[in-house]
Amino acid sequence: MRKVSSSYLPILLFFSLAIFVLSNPTWALIKLPPNVTVPAVIVFGDSIMDTGNNNHLKSVIKCDFPPYGQDFKDRKPTGRFGNGKVPSDLLVEELGIKEYLPAYLDPNLGPKDLPTGVCFASGGTGFDPMTPKIAAVLSFPEQLGMFKEYLGKLTATVGKEGTKFILENAIFLVVAGSDDIANTYFTIRIRKLQYDVPSYTDLMVNGASDFIKDLYQLGARRIGVFGTPPIGCVPSQRTLGGGLFRVCAEEYNEAAILFNSKISATLDSLKSKLPNSRLVYVDIYNPLLELILNPQKYGFDQVDKGCCGTGALEVAILCNPLTPPCENPSSRIFWDSYHPSEAAYKILVPQLLKKYVNSFI
């Protein structure tokens, strides 16, 4: 038998992986058009998407301890900011790619994990360069640096042509902005002394725009950017900014709406400047607000408190074994005072995919 040249091994490995993914359509809950493939999902951003990168940082913004992960596989706290799967996981599951999206800094990450995508997100980060500094987490330039390192490893695994194919057909997702508005601007108020809301949202948009252009220069073509949710309605911001009755902090929501309108317009403008790009604005503000305004319609009985502890302020290190969770997390929109529950994500993610997936292809 003729021995296969080692120079062909990356190509053979890539195509074997591609055939394996494409021959398992039963995994996929979202049906793609014929002859269209999404070989990988690659995610950047904050705690909504982080699948464990912060475990490996010297930061207090962590959740690799109970009760986090109590509804995850083997009831394991993995560093995901929730009780179970987060959107990163549900997205790759819905697309039929794999069951979980691994964190890039996971020491168990192997070559076989690379062609189908990884997560670079870091809880607590933002488009404002000051936001990750305050939280001691990964900035967007640092996430981009890890992505460059990933590209080298990916090329060594599947070769240059395989890497080019993955970059051109993968879906890249960018999720941030909540920590900029809720923490850096309104809670810590450092930026509030320097900027009004319109100029601060300009700062955020400029950071997002620069990152998108950097991703494009590195080969990404299908790039989705999530808007900011109704951050004033999450339990912690109701507590901090919603007054005695803990109503939605409208000032926070107005800032989110302004940022969303600007980033949506910026993406439209960039499309003409970045040939062959698919830049998609993903509205999460209205779908989450719909759950909050009509909870019973979706099977929830609590909107203004999370499941962990009192539900009013506990998040990250404040949500710990000394603050036991509610009996039924699936009855709550929010798991802790800042992050939705797996049950809420399981309603939101399929909706978003069905609405936007064709915009990427």
Image (cartoon, rainbow, N blue to C red):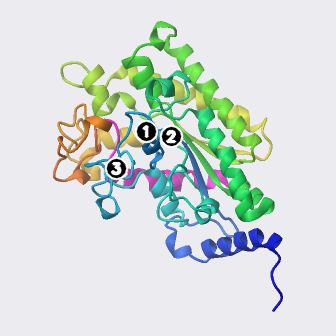
- Residues at discs 2 and 1 in contact (Cβ within 8 Å): yes
The segment highlighted magenta reads 338-361
Residue 101 rendering spot, x and y as whole percentages: 50, 57
The residue sitting at 36% across, 19% down in the picture is 187
Gap between marks 2 and 3 measured at Cα: 16 Å
Amino acid at circle 1: Asn
Label 2 sits on residue = 283
Label 3 sits on residue = 344
Amino acid at circle 3: Ala
Residue 175 rendering spot, x and y as whole percentages: 52, 39
Q: With 32 as the anchor, is 159 left or right in this view?
A: right
Residue 265 rendering spot, x and y as whole percentages: 63, 30
Label 1 sits on residue = 286
Estimate how packed mark 1 is, as few (under 14), some (14 to 19) or many (20 or more) residues with alpha carbons within 10 Å: some
Query: Is any part of residue 112 visible from this angle?
Result: yes
Which of disc 1 and disc 3 is earlier in sequence?
1
Does 75 appear in magenta?
no
Q: Is residue 275 above or below residue 153?
A: above
Gap between marks 2 and 1 measured at Cα: 7 Å
Outermost residue, top direction?
193
Examine the residues drawn in magenta and state their main secondary structure: helix
Q: With 358 as the anchor, is 108 left or right in this view?
A: left
Q: Secondary structure at mark 3?
A: helix
Query: Is any part of residue 254 visible from this angle?
Result: no
Outermost residue, bottom direction?
1
